[in-house]
Amino acid sequence: MFTKLSFSAFTGLVLSLILSLFWIDSALADVPISLAAESFIVKAIDRTGPSVVRINTERLVTDASSQELLLKELFGIDTLPRQERKEILSGQGSGFIIDSSGVLLTNAHVVDKADKVTVTLKDGRVFNGTVQGTDELTDLAVVKIDPHGQNIPIAPLGDSDKLRVGDWAIAVGNPLGLDNTVTIGIISTLDRSAAKVGIRDKRIDFLQTDAAINPGNSGGPLLNSQGEVIGINTAIRADANGIGFAIPINKAKSLENYLAQGKQVPHPYIGIGMFNLTPEIAKQNNSDSNSQYGILPEVNGILIVNVVKTSPAQKAGLRRGDIVVSANENEVTDAEVLQTLVENTGVNQPVKLKVRRGDSLIDLEVETAQLQNMS
């Protein structure tokens, strides 16, 4: 009896081990080979880490002395010779090299109004940098160094259009001057508009990640599991725990030539504030006797809530309370779709709108213009 039970138990144990090994083998089949042999993070950093640089900036500011300001405030005296105080403001951020000639990508706010830019490589080499171009609305900048014929490491660029939610995301940068600090997470959302995350002075759709992005990481690369750059670390929100944002690398590729040549990046706009209108929202508005929009038709469309003065929209005759129902002969019910259409149209190009105003349908043509920084 004792021998028979032991044999049965032994047989069951062996069978369980075989099934367990089969399950483990099946699970490992879905894991990258690099995970089984060596950390894919290590390989990614070995491949791209040397191209990540620290950017130090200096800016000379001149201001009135505190004594002069006090005299003006207390006595209204503003005729004394100006006693100017000069101060050097220092800043720091990250960037990465994308070309053997010394072209770097970083954030516009990292090098904003800098009088001096110093670029330090991971191996300790130091170069003077020249800001070639900046675009505040996308927070992108191109900086150039002269490698003087030396070999410099170059970051391989990936394809951000191929990203999926759940893909690995590795953030590299220099927070607090700590070179090549690495954090890891995943891509948690694609195409997160700046407006939706409360960053209204930017005009871009971000990659959202839970990889920690600190202020010093700004301008550094966001990598995939192969060590390719898929984004540029940029905005963080203090009230959003564990959420960071990055500019998709394909967006940077499309704007690099403008910035490298010091040209203005085109940002078409027409100058309206808008939100999506649905029959339900219209009903709620119509039940409010104090509604500023009066009675709205219970339809799907895009309600114009304000028109910017002297904007293309105002010149074309658009008014608050108008409902856009089509653009370029395509039905539109989503404000983001209309925004994208305008951006893809180009500057100084016509956009044909069909607008419902009261009981009438009106055809208007709006010519886009260049949007200046909104900050």
Image (cartoon, rainbow, N blue to C red):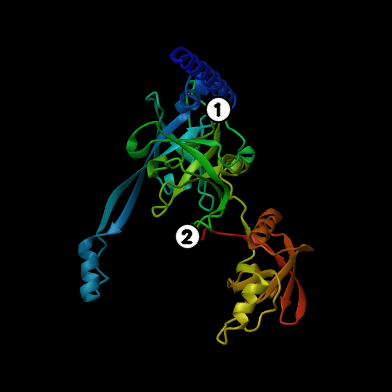
The tally of labels here is 2
Q: Position of residue 361 (x, y in %)?
A: 77, 77
Q: Nearer the viewer, residue 264 or 314?
A: 314
Q: Is residue 259 left or right of residue 129?
A: right
Amino acid identity at mark 1: Gln
Q: Residue at x 58, y 32 (%)?
A: 157
Q: Position of residue 356 (x, y in %)?
A: 73, 76
Q: Residue furthest bottom?
A: 289
Q: Residues within 10 Å of mark 1 (few under 14, many from 20)?
A: some
| Res. 88 mark | none
Query: Is residue 49 in view from this perspective?
Result: yes
Residue 367 figure quarter? bottom right
| Res. 375 mark | 2
Q: Is residue 362 left or right of residue 234?
A: right
SS of the residue under disc 2: loop
Q: Position of residue 217 (x, y in %)?
A: 41, 40
Q: Residue at x 57, y 82 (%)?
A: 292
Q: Say if 295 sits above or below 326 in the image.
A: below
| Res. 226 mark | 1
Q: Residue at x 55, y 27 (%)?
A: 226
Q: Position of residue 287 (x, y in %)?
A: 60, 83
Q: Disc 1 and disc 2: Cα gap in Å?
A: 37 Å
